[in-house]
């Protein structure tokens, strides 16, 4: 079966399955950017629906729609600034979010957008490429195997947005540092496994100080270090000239890795005093972003 014939069949099945009554039952008062009827081909390509176009992963479906909604104001800002938008997806995995962004740019916003996804795992890159081809987005979504620093577009190519969803530990810092260095207008990261600061605090366990109970208790050290790491990232982004917000983007019962940091470039770099005060108050250990974004 050709790809075009496959897409036609998926669209026909979606029209038959997703009646107005079924859509109302699924969505209630929600207004997702992509409905399972209009976006049936993309959802099937992403593995979020079955052959009959009923949803296989409703939670993931709502998560990626919610993420796009949260980024909506920033994305509108980008569309106003740039005639075409280039998005770098760092540690892209199977690239649910960026393929949804590419679909929205074509079918909802009617605004040119290019996605460059980078990941070290050749298997997930192969899967991302397969999905992009099925969704007929391969001409605007390119995926490469490699490290972020080595595989990022050349400096002569603008990067308008950098996203990194659940990039582990210091990989989030590397994505943010690249975005800062390239002057990206939008940075959006959902950090994961922030272990760097916890490792540094473990070395302070024999010291006295106000933070000693946290340094000496492995569970508290891990939990507190994750939040403080994100607070340090927020402070460093602000010092780099970004307006920054941190928010819960999925309920905690879905995943504990549910913080989304969104930064919009608004001005010139400033003082790191807020970061340095937080660093010193919690033991003096720097995070990677502070070292690689000077």
Image (cartoon, grey):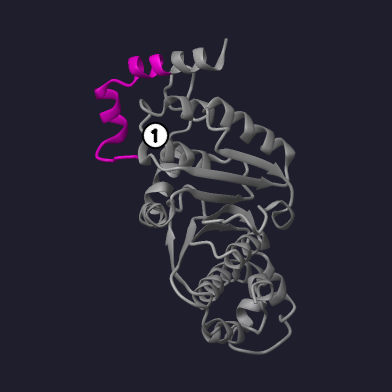
Please give the range of residues in magenta: 11-33
Q: Which quadrant is home to the C terminus?
A: bottom right
- Which residue is label 1 attached to? 107
* 264 up-or-down from 83: above or below: below
Q: Quadrant of the N terminus?
A: top right
97 vs 137, nearest the viewer = 137
Q: Nearer the viewer, residue 239 or 61?
A: 239
- The main secondary structure of the magenta stretch is helix
Which of the 4 image quadrants contains residue 94? top right
The answer to whether 164 is drawn above or below residue 126 in the figure is below
| Relative to 40, 218 lies left or right | right
Residue 293 location (% of width, % of height):
64, 72
- Percent across and percent down for residue 155 are 65, 59
Q: Relative to 293, is 33 on the left or the right? A: left
Q: Quadrant of residue 205?
A: bottom right
Whether residue 228 sits left or right of residue 9 in the image: it is: right
Residue 21 within the segment the image draws in magenta: yes
Residue drawn at 66 percent across, 47 percent down:
118
Count residues near mark 1 (Cα–Cα under 10 Å), then give few for <14, some for 14-19, many for 20+.
few
Q: Nearer the viewer, residue 29 or 206?
A: 29
Q: Residue at x 56, y 56 (%)?
A: 159
Secondary structure of the residue carrying tag 1 is: helix
Q: Is residue 138 magenta?
A: no
């Amino acid at each position: 079966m050709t790809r075009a014939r496959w897409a036609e069949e998926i669209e026909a099945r979606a029209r038959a399955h997703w009646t107005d009554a079924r859509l109302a039952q699924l969505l209630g008062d929600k207004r997702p950017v992509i409905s399972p009827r209009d976006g049936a081909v993309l959802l099937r390509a992403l593995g979020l629906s079955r052959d009959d176009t009923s949803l296989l992963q409703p939670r993931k479906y709502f998560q990626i729609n919610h993420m796009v909604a949260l980024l909506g104001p920033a994305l509108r800002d980008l569309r106003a600034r740039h005639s075409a938008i280039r998005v770098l997806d760092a540690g892209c995995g199977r690239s649910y979010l960026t393929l949804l962004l590419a679909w929205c740019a074509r079918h909802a916003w009617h605004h040119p957008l290019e996605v460059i996804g980078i990941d070290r795992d050749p298997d997930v890159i192969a899967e991302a490429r397969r999905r992009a081809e099925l969704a007929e987005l391969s001409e605007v979504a390119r995926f490469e195997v490699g490290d972020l620093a080595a595989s990022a577009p050349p400096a002569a190519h603008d990067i308008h947005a950098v996203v990194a969803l659940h990039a582990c530990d210091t990989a989030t810092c590397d994505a943010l540092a690249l975005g800062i260095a390239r002057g990206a207008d939008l940075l959006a990261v959902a950090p994961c496994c922030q272990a760097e600061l916890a490792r540094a605090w473990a070395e302070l366990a024999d010291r006295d100080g106000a933070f000693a109970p946290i340094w000496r208790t492995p569970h508290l050290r891990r939990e507190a270090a994750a939040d403080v790491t994100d607070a340090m990232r927020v402070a460093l982004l602000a010092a780099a000239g970004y307006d920054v917000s941190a928010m819960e983007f999925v309920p905690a019962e879905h995943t504990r890795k549910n913080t989304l940091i969104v930064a919009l470039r608004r001005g010139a770099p400033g003082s790191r005093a807020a970061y340095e005060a937080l660093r010193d108050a919690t033991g003096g250990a720097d995070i990677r972003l502070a070292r690689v974004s000077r």
